[in-house]
Image: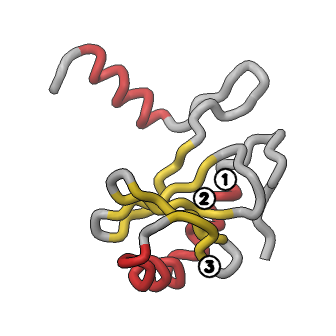
Amino acid sequence: MTGPIVAELLQDLEAGPIYDDAGRRSLNEVKVGEIGGLLVFVFADEHPPPHFCVKYGDESANFRISDGAKMQGKLDRFERNIRKWYKKNRAHIIEQWNLNRPTDCPVGDFKD
């Protein structure tokens, strides 16, 4: 797939986050990692407590950043791998969470 639209989209993605007139990010999903076929995201302007989301196909589950405990969702067969990945990547998850908080986010930065 090529063409001017694809080239423009790729350029926009490489440019980084987009901010609206109020200075808030308009992109709300940031991929922070992969665990095999699982995708790990943090979202801007989220509800408490600070957490990350793991998606696999149409399934997803949320996990607390503080301790990696599952909050909700169904990825039971992958939880052991998710916990192992979380332990190795906790600092990166926190960094991405804090980098992607909009100024008016009700949750704010994660503090250990």
User: Does label 3 or label 2 sit earlier along the sequence?
Assistant: 3
CB-based contact (under 8 Å), mark 1 and mark 2: yes
Residue nearest the observer in this picture, 6 or 54: 54
Looking at numbered disc 1 in the image, what kind of residue is underneath it?
A: Leu
Q: Which residue is mark 1?
A: 99
Residue nearest the observer in this picture, 73 or 8: 73
Residue nearest the observer in this picture, 23 or 55: 55
Q: Which residue is mark 2?
A: 96
- Give the percent coordinates (x, y) of residue 3: 20, 17
Q: Which label is found at residue 69?
A: 3
Q: CA distance from mark 3 to mark 1?
A: 22 Å
Mark 1 lies on a secondary structure that is helix
Q: CA distance from mark 3 to mark 2?
A: 18 Å
Looking at the rendering, in which quadrant would you find the C terminus? bottom right
Residue found at x 60% / y 78%:
68
Looking at numbered disc 2 in the image, what kind of residue is underneath it?
A: Gln
- Give the percent coordinates (x, y) of residue 32: 49, 59
- Give the percent coordinates (x, y) of residue 79: 44, 79
- Give the percent coordinates (x, y) of residue 86: 52, 78
Mark 3 lies on a secondary structure that is loop
Residue count near mark 3 (Cα–Cα under 10 Å), binned few <14, some 14–19, many ≥20 = some
Image quadrant in which you'd find residue 34: bottom left
Vertically, is 68 above or below 23?
A: below
Vertically, is 29 above or below 74?
A: above
Q: CA distance from mark 1 to mark 2?
A: 5 Å
Mark 2 lies on a secondary structure that is helix
Q: Which label is found at residue 56?
A: none
Looking at numbered disc 3 in the image, what kind of residue is underneath it?
A: Ala
